[in-house]
Amino acid sequence: MERIVEKIMIEGVTMEYSIMGKGEPLLVFHGGHSNCYEEFGYKALIESGFSLITPSRPGYGETSKEIGTSLLTACHFYKRLLDHLNIEKVHVLAISAGGPSGIFFAATYPENVHTLILQSAVTKEWLTPKNIEYKVANVIFRPKTEKFTWKLISVMNNVFPRFIFKQMFPSFSTLTFRQAKDKLDMKDIDAIRKMNNRQRSGEGFLIDLVQINEVTIDTLQAVKCPTFIMHSKNDGSVPLEHPNLAYENISLSKLHLLDTWGHLIWLGKSSEETDSSLINFLTSHKISSD
């Protein structure tokens, strides 16, 4: 899959983005610890005739952290990116910790958003200072240490891929490894290994932990485009309260709970259902049919 990566200066700050595929455009808001080199779910969309525009969100990759002073500010720059590319309307695909960005963009620029897709997405308050995960994240994923954290994880994962997969599994799934055995695909271990090799937090993940709190019930209710909410029944990273809240408050939403093994809904034996259900939604809501 050919990926074009560019950087542009907007109002004195840098935004990095990638473009893959040709066809109706999807503006992709990647998850935490990722960037414009994200891969999960891309292949099926490109083969089905869609193009994917993926900006590295604030503090990730080569995108300036200043773009992330607030979700409103960040969305202003995403709109400027679409203007730069001469794209008037997009499908928005928001993944995991990228959920708040997608929701806020759809609520703020409804004239530019044809549909919204939430995949394993955070939609409300998530990790807080009271959570042990929040406290750990502020140590191991802070800018001065995150490079060493991911280097250690990737080295260990390359040497002991199955062991690291099993160690990380509880952070992705509410199932035990034994319970999930029939849902796993042998390729999942290598997919996690490759993911860990490309993961970086930069300054982005700590920005995410702040911006998540800017999404409110009013924000969700301001989303008026057709919305497809995709979430695993067994997600151990983002609880089911998140998709349920979005479904209750976005008027034109449809909730599709997947029986995948966990948060990474593009992996496992049910991954084809993830791809096919998303493509069916997109083809039934073509921008060109407006």
Image (cartoon, rainbow, N blue to C red):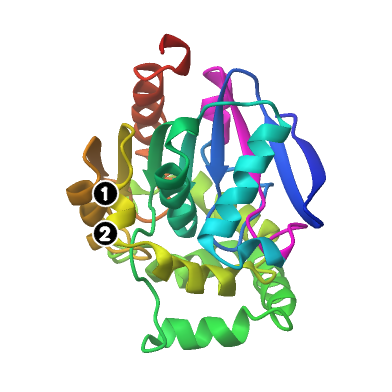
Q: Secondary structure at mark 2?
A: helix
Find out whether residue 281 is within the magenta segment: no
- Residue 276 percent coordinates (x, y): 38, 26
Circles 2 and 1, Cβ within 8 Å, touching? The answer is yes
Out of 36 and 197, give the one closest to the viewer.
Answer: 36
Structural crowding at the residue carrying mark 2, measured as other residues with C-alpha within 10 Å and reported as few (<14), some (14–19) or many (≥20): some
Res. 180 in view: no
Q: Which mark is residue 221?
A: 1
Out of 170 and 276, give the one closest to the viewer.
Answer: 276
Q: Which mark is residue 103?
A: none
- Residue 5 percent coordinates (x, y): 78, 40
Q: Amino acid at mark 1?
A: Gln
217 versus 185 height, above or below: below
Out of 238 and 216, give the one closest to the viewer.
Answer: 216
* The C terminus: image quadrant: top left
- Residue 125 percent coordinates (x, y): 34, 70
Out of 180 and 200, give the one closest to the viewer.
Answer: 200
Q: Amino acid at mark 2?
A: Ile
* Residue identifier under label 2: 217
167 versus 185 height, above or below: below
Identify which residue is drawn at 23% across, 41% down. Answer: 255
Q: Residue furthest left?
A: 248
Q: Secondary structure at mark 1?
A: helix
Looking at the rendering, the stretch of residues picked out in magenta corresponds to 42-64
How far is disc 2 from disc 1 in space, using C-alphas?
A: 6 Å
